[in-house]
Image: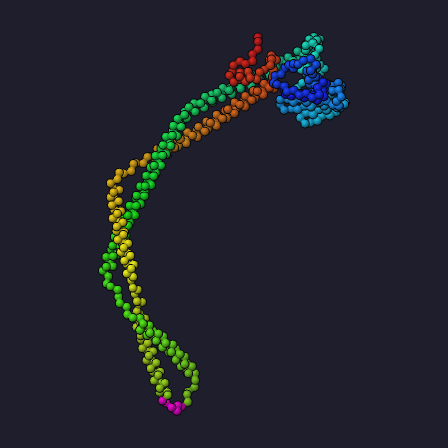
Amino acid sequence: MLKRITLHNFMSHAFTEIELSPGLTVLTGPNNCGKSAFVSALQVLAENTSGDYMVRHGAKECRVIVETDDGHVIEWKRKKKVVSYTIDGQDFHRLRNNVPDILPEVLRLAKVKSGDSDEFDVHFGEQKSPIFLLGDRGSRAARFFASSSDASVLIEMQKRHRSKVKVAQQDYQRQQTEQKQNEATLKLLEPVPDLESELETLETQYQALQADTQQIQQLETLISELTKAEARVALCSRRVTCLQELPGPLEQEPERPLAALVQRWQTIQLGLQRSQTTVSALQTLSDPPALQNESALSALIRDFQLQDRICQHSQATQNCLEPLDEPPQLTDPESLEKLIARLTAAEARTQRDRKEAEILAECVSPPQLVDGAKLAQFCQQWTAAETQFLERKQIHAGVEAEYEQARVELLHLVEENPTCPTCGGELEPDRFIQSAETGLKGHTHDA
């Protein structure tokens, strides 16, 4: 179907553009306003008529541009004696009074052929010529009607049309059934909001029970801590009782004489080592010469003997001191006083905790908890209902999409076949869709 016609320097039109509304059949206007020029432009576009009569006086070229509702753009241009076509951006030149092969399929204004030689122009009529076929010979009219009444083709078209209508009606009935099922499902799901509010109430109660459970656990922990504190207090009391029976601290002997004795012993030990070293060195010497004066040697011998006795005494003292333990450390009385103070404070806390436990024992027991299994079962039922609702919603959306697709296909069918294949009458898309949706009779044929 044509959507827009534009004329450039064509006959009396310098530039004229008209947009055709759907179903346009008549152009009206005063005389000599250029109505026939549009018909001539369409004839030139469809047949590539020879001659330059259509070029506006004083212009070098003329153009005819037609746009169709299915998106095709067809342009015919004549410049001097050269004619060219541009169809959807593709140029065609050197046609020699012919038209491009794809033009009849795109424009759909070509002549109808009957046999090998006869052609019938069913789209255009001359302004001063009789009505179509009335001015022709009877044989020519008979050939036209014979060529246009191919019974097998018409019957096949009718069968296809009826088959498509039947499939569309079945699809419509199926969609109606599914729609009713979906409506019933939605009706069953109407109590879902009430269940949701009840579930929120149960959730609030469950949270309150959880808070009470936490408080109970805290009280149990407090009671356990009080029991442990009482055991610690008893242990500390027993320790205090045991410590009270101990004697007073031991008196320590002064350590300075012992330290002086040890230092003296260490000095003697060093002297002994030096003496042994000296003796070892003297053993390598030869015999001493005869002494002239033995008094010095006697004095030296006495000194050695004295040092030997001193070493023996120091060794005996060391042997006595080695098995002795380290002296015990004195206990700090301040730490013991702090321990007694802590024990007293712990006993006071124990008395206070015991009173609190007695008060808590008189309190009313907490309410019983709700059965978790029933609550879990209700949550599972809610989840299953929600999943089923979403699935039904997706099915409903799919049905709506299929219905819209069937409706668009029916519209395309009417656009591709605007006339009835049986009676040749014009099909109205709205009534055709209405008849397909409701199953009522839309387009009828008179007997």
Is residue 246 shown above or below 257? above
Q: Which residue is situated farthest in the right direction here?
A: 81
Q: Quadrant of residue 140?
A: top right
Is residue 276 shown above or below 366? below
Is residue 376 shown above or below 121? below
**x and y percentages locating residue 207 in the rendered image:** 35, 36
| Main secondary structure type of the part rendered in magenta | loop
Quadrant including the N terminus: top right
Q: Quadrant of residue 408?
A: top right
Quadrant including the C terminus: top right
Residue in the image at 41% along x and 87% along y: 287
Residue 199 is left or right of residue 223, and the answer is: right
**x and y percentages locating residue 107 in the rendered image:** 66, 20
Q: Is residue 91 visible?
A: yes
**x and y percentages locating residue 81 in the rendered image:** 77, 22
Residue in the image at 29% along x and 61% along y: 332
Report the number of discs.
0
Residue 100 is left or right of residue 291, and the answer is: right
Residue in the image at 61% along x and 16% along y: 23
Confirm whether the magenta stretch covers residue 12. Answer: no
Q: Which residue is situated farthest in the left direction here?
A: 245
Magenta range is 290-295
Residue 342 is left or right of residue 180, and the answer is: left
Q: Quadrant of residue 156?
A: top right
**x and y percentages locating residue 341 in the rendered image:** 27, 55
Confirm whether the magenta stretch covers residue 293. Answer: yes
State the scheme by which the image is colored. Answer: rainbow
Is residue 142 shown above or below 73? above
Residue 294 is left or right of residue 160, and the answer is: left
Q: Is residue 139 visible?
A: no
Residue in the image at 58% along x and 18% along y: 414
